[in-house]
Image: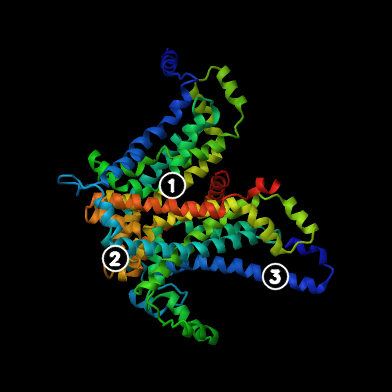
């Protein structure tokens, strides 16, 4: 009896083969409409209004945009964001590509160990890492300064520091210029492994026969790298750099914890995302904050288009032609 | 490198090859050292008092103050409660995400329907939208729903996310149609096929997605920082941020907190690093 009753219910709930896929994919679209699309449109609406979330909302036209685009703090934050982006993205991808290229060569042993190690920083929390780096970068008690003071005993290092007027112990988290290097250093440490893995995955898709052919033709390692590896990796580089652009232009957690919500000395560590956070949630300027989000989004689109110009094309298909 | 093998008879060439290998290996090893030093330092600092941190920067010997640091930590933040919150949120989010993303992946992978490609690509396109674009209205909405200081905002919105659905679609593409057809002939309903046949066959995909979802949920800061306002509702990243904000907090005490936040992840990583790396590589190369 019980069995019959159950099957009766499942019969009634039984999905038609035509309807089933729409039901299965609907959760994404429903959630996206509520928690994705609606807030984006609402944000657009808010960007033309002035509102603190409690009082009356008033329409202000393009005032919020005009305010932001003439706001020194906003442009300072954009400058900091771009400087940190450049300071971290270039070494990140260079290190990652080199590590992946070495790891992909046949003679290297313990590949799994190396890959697993490099990827480790990526999985740990940004907040925890920022707190560790806060101590590592400490002025008097930090390991990095202690190491540099030790290295300073070596004449070539001493010469280098003197030429660049680099005083020890350095105020890594106190001097505006150094703050950006510190944040970039932390990001490089954290994301090189991720990029390495992406490049490694890309390298694995390049057929061994291509390398064989190059070897038969007597190509040097450098030729193999520039003539085969790089062009074939172009789509992967494009993907990696795109992710770096999207991630870095929205950079928030690492500097927020490392130098504090106010961005540290001279606001050098205040990224646009942090300024947006402050505008929206500390000062309750929802309109300005929303306008800022849209301006930032436009910057991301522009940078992505530049990136596309630089790295689009390439890949296996193009080589075959 | 294998390109040099041709000249191996030449001993000079051999010596050069060895030097090359030494250089390349030292590059790899240097990378590992740089990666590990902060973690090592974290464990050392957790055992040191304020004075010891200043006096023994290079020393590898642990200090005596671990329990003192721990006492300072728990008098400042309810860290075990925060740990429980993190575990609860991450676990719930992971289970629901795996279910709904598998369901969506199944829909996209094993059915042909009208507008399938359009829907799939518009879903993928939403991945490119910067999250910051919606953060202010998102917060207003959560306020409107009465979800401030609750766990819902950290769980519900992401349970059917495009990355997860994409990843599961890729994994399910490898499942043959025969199995499904056979089940249909046996009288299985569409949802039953998913639950009884597809889910058990997608274990590797589910593994990768679970780990990535758990990590993302465990580490996120901005949303919980906005939503979770009372101390006993904080997740670990919020608790650590608040702890770091306090002027003059002992580094040692903060490090004990950091260890509590990182240890579960480190352990999970040691067990599941293979599937994590595989998941990330799959997601990247197929994308």
Do residues under tags 2 and 1 come within 8 Å of each other at their CB atoms? no
Q: State the mark number for residue A28.
A: none
Q: Tag 3 or tag 1, which sits nearer the N-term?
A: 3
Q: Position of residue B34 (x, y in %)?
A: 52, 68
Task: Tell me the tag on residue B214.
Answer: 1
Q: Is residue B5 left or right of residue A144?
A: right
Q: Earlier in the sequence, mark 2 or mark 1?
A: 2
Query: Residue B262, relative to residue A177: is it above or below?
Result: above
Q: Answer few, some or many: residues within 10 Å of disc 2's Cα (few below 14, many 20 plus, some between 14 and 19).
A: some
Q: Which quadrant is home to the C terminus of chain A?
A: top right
Q: In the figure, residue B202 lies in which quadrant?
A: top right
Q: CA distance from mark 3 to mark 2?
A: 51 Å
What residue would you read off at disc 2? B72
- Label 3, on which residue? B20
Disc nearer the start of the sequence (3/2): 3
Q: Are discs 3 and 2 less than 8 Å apart at CB?
A: no
The subunit carrying tag 3 is B
Q: Position of residue A195 (x, y in %)?
A: 54, 56
Of residues A276 and B232, the one nearer the viewer is A276
**Within the image, what quadrant is residue B72 found in?**
bottom left
* Label total for image: 3
Let me know if residue B231 appears in the view.
no
The answer to which of A194 and A78 lies nearer the viewer is A78
Secondary element under disc 3, as helix, strand or loop, is helix
Mark 2 residue element:
helix
């Amino acid at each position: 009896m019980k069995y019959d009753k159950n099957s009766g219910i499942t019969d009634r709930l039984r999905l038609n083969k035509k309807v089933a896929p729409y039901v299965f994919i609907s959760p994404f679209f429903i959630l996206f409409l509520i928690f994705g699309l609606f807030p984006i449109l609402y944000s657009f609406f808010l960007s033309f209004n002035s509102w603190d979330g409690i009082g009356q909302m008033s329409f202000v036209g393009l005032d919020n945009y005009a305010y932001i685009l003439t706001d020194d703090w906003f442009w300072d934050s954009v400058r900091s964001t771009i400087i940190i982006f450049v300071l971290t993205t270039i070494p990140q991808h260079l290190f990652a590509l080199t590590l992946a290229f070495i790891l992909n060569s046949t003679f290297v042993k313990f590949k799994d160990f190396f890959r697993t190690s490099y990827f480790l920083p990526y999985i740990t929390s940004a907040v925890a890492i920022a707190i560790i780096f806060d101590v590592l970068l400490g002025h008097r008690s930090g390991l990095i300064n202690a190491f540099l003071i030790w290295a300073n005993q070596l004449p070539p290092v001493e010469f280098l520091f003197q030429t660049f007027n680099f005083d020890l112990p350095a105020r890594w988290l106190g001097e505006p210029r150094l703050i950006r290097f510190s944040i970039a250093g932390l990001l490089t440490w954290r994301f090189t492994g991720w990029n390495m893995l992406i490049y490694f995955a890309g390298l694995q898709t390049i057929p061994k026969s291509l390398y064989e052919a190059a070897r038969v033709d007597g190509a040097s390692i450098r030729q193999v790298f520039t003539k085969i590896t790089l062009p074939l990796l172009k789509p992967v580089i494009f993907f990696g750099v795109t992710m770096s652009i999207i991630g870095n232009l929205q950079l928030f957690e690492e500097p927020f914890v490392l130098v504090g919500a106010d961005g540290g000395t001279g606001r050098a560590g205040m990224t646009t995302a942090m300024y947006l956070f402050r505008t929206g949630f500390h000062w309750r300027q929802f309109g300005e904050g929303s306008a800022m989000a849209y301006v930032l989004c436009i910057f991301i689109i522009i940078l992505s288009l530049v990136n596309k110009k630089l790295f689009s094309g390439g890949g296996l298909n193009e080589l075959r032609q | 490198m294998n390109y040099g093998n041709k000249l191996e008879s030449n001993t000079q060439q051999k010596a050069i090859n060895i030097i090359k290998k030494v250089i390349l290996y030292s590059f790899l090893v240097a990378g590992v050292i740089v990666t590990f030093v902060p973690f090592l330092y974290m464990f050392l600092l957790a055992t040191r008092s304020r004075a010891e941190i200043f006096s023994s920067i290079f020393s590898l010997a642990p200090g005596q103050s671990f329990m003192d640091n721990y006492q300072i930590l728990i008098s400042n933040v309810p860290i075990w409660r925060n740990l429980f919150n993190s575990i609860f949120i991450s676990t719930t989010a992971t289970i629901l995400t795996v279910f709904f993303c598998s369901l969506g992946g199944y829909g996209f992978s094993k059915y042909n329907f009208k507008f399938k490609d359009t829907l799939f690509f518009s879903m993928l396109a939403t991945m490119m939208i910067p999250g910051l674009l919606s953060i202010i209205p998102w917060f207003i909405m959560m306020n409107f729903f009465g979800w401030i200081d609750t766990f819902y905002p950290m769980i519900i919105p992401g349970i059917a996310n495009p990355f997860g659905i994409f990843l599961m679609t890729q994994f399910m593409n490898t499942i043959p149609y025969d199995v499904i057809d056979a089940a249909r002939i046996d009288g299985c309903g569409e949802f039953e096929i998913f639950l009884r046949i597809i889910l058990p066959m997608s274990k590797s995909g589910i593994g990768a997605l679970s780990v990535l979802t758990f990590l993302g949920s465990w580490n996120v800061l901005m949303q919980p920082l906005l939503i979770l306002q009372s101390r006993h509702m904080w997740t670990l990243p919020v608790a650590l941020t608040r702890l770091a904000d306090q002027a003059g907090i002992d580094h040692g005490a903060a490090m004990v907190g950091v260890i509590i936040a990182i240890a579960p992840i480190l352990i999970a990583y040691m067990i599941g690093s293979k599937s994590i790396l595989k998941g990330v590589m799959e997601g990247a190369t197929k994308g």
